[in-house]
Amino acid sequence: MTPPLTVHGVPVIDIDSHYTEPPDLWTSRAPASYKERVPRVIRDEEGRERWVVDGDVDFGPMGFTVVKKDGEKAYGMMSLTDFDEMSDAASYPEPRLDLLDRLGISQQIIYPNVAGFGSHRFMSLEDSELRNICSRVYNDAIIELQQAGNGRLFPQALTPFWDMDECVREIRRVTDAGITGITMTDTPEAFELPHLHDPHWDPLWSTCQELGIPVNFHVGSGNNLGGQMIWDGYGPQRFLATISVSLFMVQCKTIMNLIFSGLLDRYPNLNFVSVESG
């Protein structure tokens, strides 16, 4: 084991890692009546593995993982094609801990992929209860991941923000299980919901403040601004470079809203995290 890296005596913590969800994450845990509707993996006409939900709702590639089994990176792409090509450390606790040992990293904060970085991709599903089940099953899986992490892996929970009563219940449930934070879309107005400082969200903020858990806004957790700023003739590498810059713009708007709206004054002990924001 490599001794943990330190900076001025402080251990190095990876504050923005991601979880490449295993193909059976939902199908192995969902209630029997929902097993055919929750996220599962198929192979498309071009031979690539993709996630689909509720029959045919496309949720994109198998994972946003470009690290191969041998540790080498694939460049110029969003993801490797198949799960079996991807590093086991992206999905399973023991290989991940082994990797952290080799890199000298003490702990990781871990964010989702399939549901989007703030549960927002589930908004493409018409059935609200299916959305709730998908969120709960993911959270069940990350509770297991954290328990297997020996105090070093800290995945952040999905929140069913489309259903406030369910949202509050789920936050309390995952917190009771030891989860240390939640994810949230940074642009609920993109889904015809009130903006963040509207009183609609007060039960969410007050619950998080009461429980002492942070609200994480990961770039790309709602608005598709990045995808709207691509010009004709852009190949995959220019596309990725443009996304990397444009997504910060949405976070700037979110942070301005939190500050200028007075929300932080109303909830002085509530912590927000702007993730991958530079």
Image: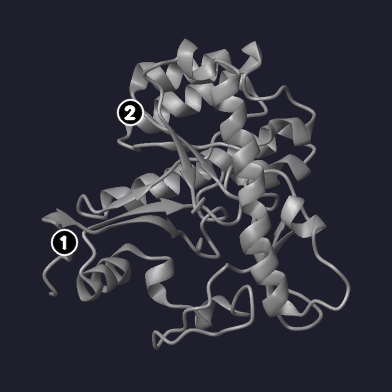
Please report the residue visible at 62 percent of the width from the left and 46 percent of the height from the top.
Answer: 221
Please report the residue visible at 69 percent of the width from the left and 53 percent of the height from the top.
Answer: 36
**Closer to us: 58 or 193:** 193
According to the picture, the residue beneath numbered tag 1 turns out to be 6
Q: Is residue 222 left or right of residue 64?
A: right
**Closer to us: 105 or 278:** 278
Percent of width and height locating residue 106 = 21, 59
Check the picture and name the quadrant holding the N terminus: bottom left
**Closer to us: 140 or 232:** 232
According to the picture, the residue beneath numbered tag 2 turns out to be 176
Percent of width and height locating residue 23 = 55, 65
- The local secondary structure at tag 2 comes to helix
Q: Is residue 131 left or right of residue 27?
A: right
Q: Is residue 94 above or below residue 201?
A: below
Percent of width and height locating residue 115 = 61, 50
Percent of width and height locating residue 90 = 43, 68
Name which quarter of the figure residue 199 lies in. Answer: top right
Please report the residue visible at 55 percent of the width from the left and 15 percent of the height from the top.
Answer: 262
Q: Is residue 226 above or below residue 81?
A: above
**Closer to us: 127 or 228:** 228
- The local secondary structure at tag 1 comes to strand
Residue that extends furthest to the right in the rendered view of this protein = 232
Name which quarter of the figure residue 126 lies in. Answer: top right
Please report the residue visible at 43 percent of the width from the left and 87 percent of the height from the top.
Answer: 72
Q: Is residue 33 visible?
A: no
Cβ–Cβ under 8 Å for marks 1 and 2: no
Q: Amino acid at mark 1?
A: Thr
Q: Amino acid at mark 2?
A: Asp
